[in-house]
Image (spheres, grey):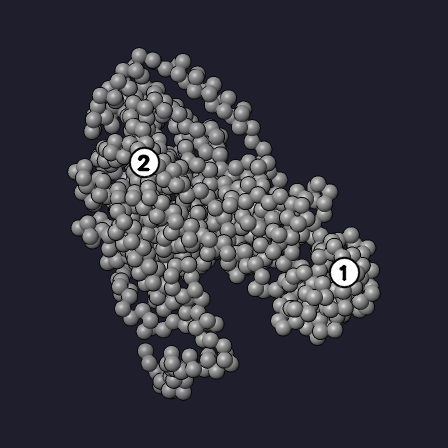
Amino acid sequence: METENNRRLLEEFAPHSYEEWKEAAVQLLKGRSFEKTLFTPTYEGFSLEPIYTGETVVDFPGQADPPGMGTRVRGSRIEGYLGGGWLISQELSAPTARELNGIALKELENGQNELNIWLDLPSRSGRSPQADDRSPGVCGLSLSTAREMRDLLEGIHPEMISLYFQSGRSAPALYALLLAAVAEGGSDPAKLSGCLGMDPLGWLAERGEFPGERARTYDIMSELIRFSEAKTPGLQIVDVQGHAYHNNGASSVQEMAALLATAVTYVREMTKRGLSAGEVVSRMRLSASIGGNFFLEIAKFRALRLLWNRVMEAFDVPQEARRVHLHARTGQWNKTLFDPYVNMLRTTTEAFSAVAGGCDSLHVAPFDEILRESDAFSRRIARNTHAILAEECGMTQVIDPGGGSWSVESLTDKMAAEAWRRFQDIESRGGMTEVLKTGWFAEAVASVREERRKNIQRRKDVILGTNTYPHPGESLPPSRKIDYTAIGKGLVEALAAARRSRDAAAVEGALASLRKGSGKDRMEAMVAAASAGATLEEVMEALDPGESDLSAEPFVLRRGAEDFEALRFAARALKERGRRPLVHQLNMGPSRRYRNRADWTSSFFHAAGIEVLNEDDYLERSDAVRAAMESGARYMIITSDDETYAEEVVPLARALKEADKDLAVFVAGAPGENEESWRAAGVDDFVHLRVNNYLFNRGLLESMGAEIRTHT
């Protein structure tokens, strides 16, 4: 309600227009470009602006929609998280069902409410080629029989929690094991919720081949959806994942476009087989990775719902059936092996983004996910990130926290527009299957990845603790050795024992019925075979999805830190061979005159694992030369302020070369018009902001005798 005081205050402080603000900003820039200085380009195809106003989002579709209605840009549910928070869906891994059951029981006791289980998937460990002595970050579950499924669910009431299986090519057989185990345990399959995780195009993207003959695989998918509608109405069957693209370096809008295009492919294939689009999407969830740009990632999840609504509208799906379950997992592109505890901070901000964007379920990765098998401590910290957001940050007490923010609404609009443009580009080229087969989408992602990579190498994009503010002399956390040979032997013995104890005739009869069946009969026979004791592999063989008839370039996991990690490992190996990677920093003059430049210069080399002798200042040229000769270093970098450079660079460089002509001499800073004279005096190169840090240090390490192993 407007009061006299309020009215007078508004009159005294009248609002300013964007043009007035811009004019004031231009004056403060003192000749620097307004656009180049204050606009930040993104990999999504648009720039972040310095200020947003109400006029920026005046035409944004869905802005006035209530949560849970219309475009659902403001959330999937009317009540948001007030009616219950997001599902705490921490990925759990262990090689055996009994071992994983022990982990799952502890996690459920401490707040997890969706069991997120890995099976039969490629590792997302993201290990550097230099980390061969370290175990993968994920050891997937081996699950072969309904008995093992019962072991997994021992002490757990499956009808009371959500079950999310990342099951890869084995999804249909896993469904049979699940139903058999649940029935034997006395639970009602109709009360199950969660997702089975069938995603054949996701398998193609990660593994490079389709998990069977396409027509047969989609036939099985359609039969599974039909059967589940009556048998397990609360269980989603299809899990459209974008992780492979994100973790290969894709932009957020590329990942969004791939999710939409993959979902559209599945809907089309299923409608060809007699299902309605509404029946298909009710059995589907979308799973996206979360990147490090806080506001863009909030916008991504809001924009995904908006675009999903647009796609559903095109398929004539009724408004009430358009809700989509959005699962989020913290991405791996920006995670690091070195200074790994910083990963805790990264996953915290990423989780905040996903929750603010309205995700329905969330996995927060343990900080050590990419370098070793996570333990109870790292799992606990990751799980408690959910609790902090819900209980201490109060994220369950607000609906669409970003709604109404001009910047968030504008970014949502732009993310949606760019993702839709890329989605249409995929569609114009024949759809997701075709762009994977031809490699077009891989090339598009590679283009963005290489742009990211160059910016990381030049330290334009910061990876804290890796290419900026590295921790010199850091040791990696100890690995946890896993005896895979012993595990494999135990699994083989357990499977053999299970086969000996079953009724072989009953199993063969059930498998024979499965081979002959079709439609609902085939699904019933599949569950019967699992109940009789057939293994997951036997069920899949009897289902006979056929041989793969489609291959593509796989989207292998890549991380932005890999190049610098390769340098760090190379420097460490060089030192272990008795050849210390060393640069002597000759700090000329009193420290107060150049300290910032000296610190920056040391960090430049530390990013590559190169040691820097930087503790001494030299007031006399002769002292600097003598110290250089005594240090044993073969690489010298002169560091000081510009005024000192004018007096010292030429005579000092000459003195160093005269003392040892094979020394490499660098100068910290751009030479400007002095380059020719300084090089003539003996300076070999210059270190400054515009230098590609990675390439410079790689060349330096190679000249020291290091062997550097990278993906490319």
Residue 400, picture quadrant:
bottom left
Q: Is residue 562 left or right of residue 196?
A: right
| Relative vertical location of residue 522 with respect to residue 693 in this rendering, above or below | above
Where in the figure is residue 84, as x and y percent of width and height? 36, 50
> Badge 1 is on which residue?
657
Measure the alpha-carbon separation of dots 1 and 2: 62 Å
Q: Residue 427 at what x, y percent from top left? A: 26, 50
Q: Residue at x 29, y 38 (%)?
A: 237
| Residue 697 placement: quadrant | bottom right
Q: Residue at x 73, y 69 (%)?
A: 650
Residue 249 location, x and y as percent?
A: 44, 50
Q: Pointer 2: what residue?
A: 550
Q: Quadrant of the N terminus?
A: bottom left
- Circle 2 packing at 10 Å, graded few (<14), some (14-19), many (20+), is some
Q: Nearer the viewer, residue 211 or 430?
A: 430
Left or right: where 383 falls relative to 681: left
Q: Are marks 1 and 2 in contact (CB under 8 Å)?
A: no
- Of residues 75 and 205, which is closer to you in this image? 205
State the residue at coordinates (19%, 49%).
315
- Residue 7 at x, y percent in the picture: 35, 85
**At 47% across and 49% down in the image, what residue appears?**
333
Identify the element where label 1 is drawn.
Answer: helix
The amino acid on which the numbered mark 2 sits, given as a three-letter code, is Leu
